[in-house]
């Protein structure tokens, strides 16, 4: 089975712009979670989707949003980018009640 | 106080040494995960535990639910084990599927 894929792998944006990141889960996995990793804050949970519904949301401002499509692929969007949004954004998929499988991440740099 | 505390933060060992990384948490959990992150960002799930002990190759993970403590052991360590090891817990209450992460342990194994 192919693993979790994320696109793009690297992205450079400027302050005020918006960005959309994409995640394709492992085939058959209906749960997709997103995480942000920064040197200062470590790994933090952003949100989780299951069957096109957001099940949980972490403590992030409304500029961070996401969605999941009927084929379980997920996107997250960050609007009005700030310098502090520079981070590695990780997506993970899982079958019910099981461990998560992480993608390689998208490294976002905001200038 | 963070919900998940890991120790040590940094660990340097000689090849062949037995290594222990500790994780303490303060909330009731449904599961605890041990993750491995190599330079470049990719994260691999090593174990998911809710009780007892699990073993995979040279890696052993244990959890004591009463004491809210888990340990990750590496036997016969090897330079390829050099990575960041991260403990994460899934709370039993509130946002039940949300993972909360420790700050990670940077392990360096010298040849």
Image (tube, coloured by chain):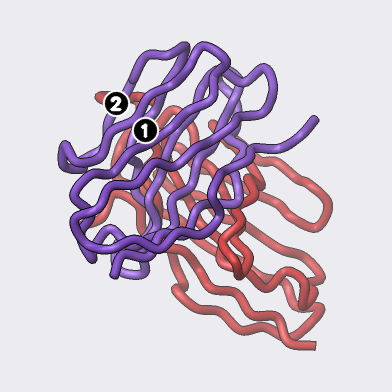
Is A1 left, or right, of B2 in this rendering? right
Chain rendered purple: A
How far from the left and from the top, in percent, is residue A110?
A: 31, 64
From what the image shows, is residue B79 above or below residue B33?
below
Separation of disc 2 and disc 1 at Cα?
A: 6 Å
Which quarter of the rendered picture does the N terminus of chain B lie within?
bottom left
Name the disc covering residue B98, or none.
Answer: 1
User: Do callouts 2 and 1 mark residues in contact (Cβ within 8 Å)?
Assistant: yes
Q: Nearer the viewer, residue B41 or B48?
A: B41
Chain holding disc 2: B
The location of residue B106, given as percent across then percent down, is 53, 73
Viewport quadrant of the C terminus of chain B? bottom right
The residue labelled by disc 2 is B95
Depth order, front residue of B92/B103: B103
Residue B66 visible (yes or no): no
Q: Residues within 10 Å of mark 2 (few under 14, many from 20)?
A: few
Left/right placement of residue B89 relative to residue A78 reads: right
Q: Residue at x 60, y 29 (%)?
A: A25
Q: Is residue A26 left or right of residue B75?
A: left
Q: Residue at x 40, y 45 (%)?
A: A35
Which chain gets the red colouring?
Answer: B
Q: Is residue A71 above or below residue A12?
A: above
């Amino acid at each position: 089975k192919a693993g979790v894929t994320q696109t793009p792998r690297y992205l450079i944006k400027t302050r005020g712009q918006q960005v959309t990141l994409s995640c394709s889960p492992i085939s058959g996995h209906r749960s997709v979670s997103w995480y942000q990793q920064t040197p200062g804050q470590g790994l933090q949970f952003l949100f989780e989707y299951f069957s096109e519904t957001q099940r949980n949301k972490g403590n992030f401002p409304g500029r961070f949003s996401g969605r999941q499509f009927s084929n379980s692929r997920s996107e997250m969007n960050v609007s009005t980018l700030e310098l502090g949004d520079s981070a590695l954004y990780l997506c993970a998929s899982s079958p019910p009640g099981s461990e998560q499988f992480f993608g390689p991440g998208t490294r976002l740099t905001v200038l | 106080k963070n919900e998940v505390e890991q120790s040590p933060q940094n660990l340097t060992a000689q090849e062949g040494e037995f290594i222990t990384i500790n994780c303490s948490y303060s909330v009731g959990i449904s599961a605890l995960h041990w993750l491995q992150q190599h330079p470049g960002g990719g994260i691999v799930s090593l174990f998911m535990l809710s009780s007892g002990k699990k073993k995979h190759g040279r890696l052993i993970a244990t959890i004591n639910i009463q004491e809210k403590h888990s340990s990750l052991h590496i036997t016969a360590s090897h330079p390829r084990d050099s990575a960041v090891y991260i403990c994460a817990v899934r709370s039993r209450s509130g946002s039940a599927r949300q993972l909360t992460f420790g700050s990670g342990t940077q392990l360096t194994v010298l040849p």
